[in-house]
Amino acid sequence: MGMANLLVALSVLAMTCSLAIAYDPSPVQDFCVATDDTACGVLVNGRFCKDPQTVTPDDFSYSGFNIAREPSKQLGVRTNLLTVEEIPGLNTNGLSIARIDFTPGGVNPPHSHPRAAEVMTVIEGALYAGFITSNPCHRLFAKVFKPGDVFVFPFGLIHFQMNIGKTPAVAIAALNSQNPGEMTLANAVFGAVPSVNPDLLARAFHTDRNIVNDLIKQEWVNPSELSDIIQGNMDFYPHPTC
């Protein structure tokens, strides 16, 4: 009986561990290039698989990642995130990658990725970056990073970056999901559609209703777009269900 209980416990532990690490489902074939063609018939990881006979190297590649994109004037940052939308061959591989360009003083505001952890490598400039732990401690882990430095932002935690140098900065970030999503805190709280009750926000943020109303009226810019006005909780790239 003792051995039977042990086997049951080990089985439950194995299933729990497999679920815990499977942020994206593991592939069951060499590749499943995402396509919007429903005639393909095979649905994997929420996307239809392109006919393997029609797959080309272009399905696994992207050009122009070396080119800086113009940062927004409001934040001084621009993110070029390559997900399964940009590289269909990422489907089922649990990966995405981003290039983040900063003007001097540019800020990638506090945000989290609900479906991924992130590894950031600084390529140019000097970035002050960090993350904050969950309730109840709210510990801040932050430091200044220079070219060649690498930093990990744990799964789902709030994090940020700021260019503290006098020249533009560039960072490359890898995320362990083909669609990591992003929740930018200020955008989500003050740019929700419809708006969150101002009295609730005033009490939650220890301020008054007038200040909250002023914040709700602001233009909340998505770091991945040049001039987007965020009016709700959006993923890192425009999502058709928004």
Image: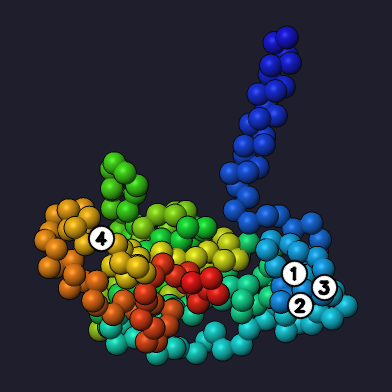
Amino acid on which the number 1 mark rests in the picture: Phe
**Label 3 Cα neighbours within 10 Å, binned few <14 / some 14-19 / many ≥20:** few
Amino acid on which the number 4 mark rests in the picture: Asn
Q: Do the residues labelled 1 and 2 touch (CB within 8 Å)?
A: yes
Amino acid on which the number 3 mark rests in the picture: Cys
The residue depicted at 24 percent of the width and 77 percent of the height is 218
**Label 4 Cα neighbours within 10 Å, binned few <14 / some 14-19 / many ≥20:** few
**Any part of residue 123 in sight:** no
- Name the mark nearer the viewer: 4 or 2: 4
What residue is disc 3 on? 40
- Seen in the picture, residue 45 relative to 239 is either above or below; the reply is above
- Sequence-wise, the earlier of marks 3 and 4 is 3
- Residues under labels 2 and 3: Cα distance? 6 Å
- Residues under labels 1 and 3: Cα distance? 7 Å
- Seen in the picture, residue 229 relative to 211 is either above or below; the reply is below
The residue depicted at 14 percent of the width and 54 percent of the height is 206
- Sequence-wise, the earlier of marks 4 and 2 is 2
- Mark 3: secondary structure: helix
Of 205 and 61, nearer the camera is 205
- Residues under labels 3 and 4: Cα distance? 45 Å
What residue is disc 1 on? 48
- Residues under labels 1 and 2: Cα distance? 7 Å
**Label 2 Cα neighbours within 10 Å, binned few <14 / some 14-19 / many ≥20:** few
What residue is disc 2 on? 37
- Mark 4: secondary structure: loop
- Sequence-wise, the earlier of marks 1 and 2 is 2
- Residues under labels 4 and 1: Cα distance? 40 Å
Rendering quarter of residue 71: bottom left
- Name the mark nearer the viewer: 3 or 4: 4
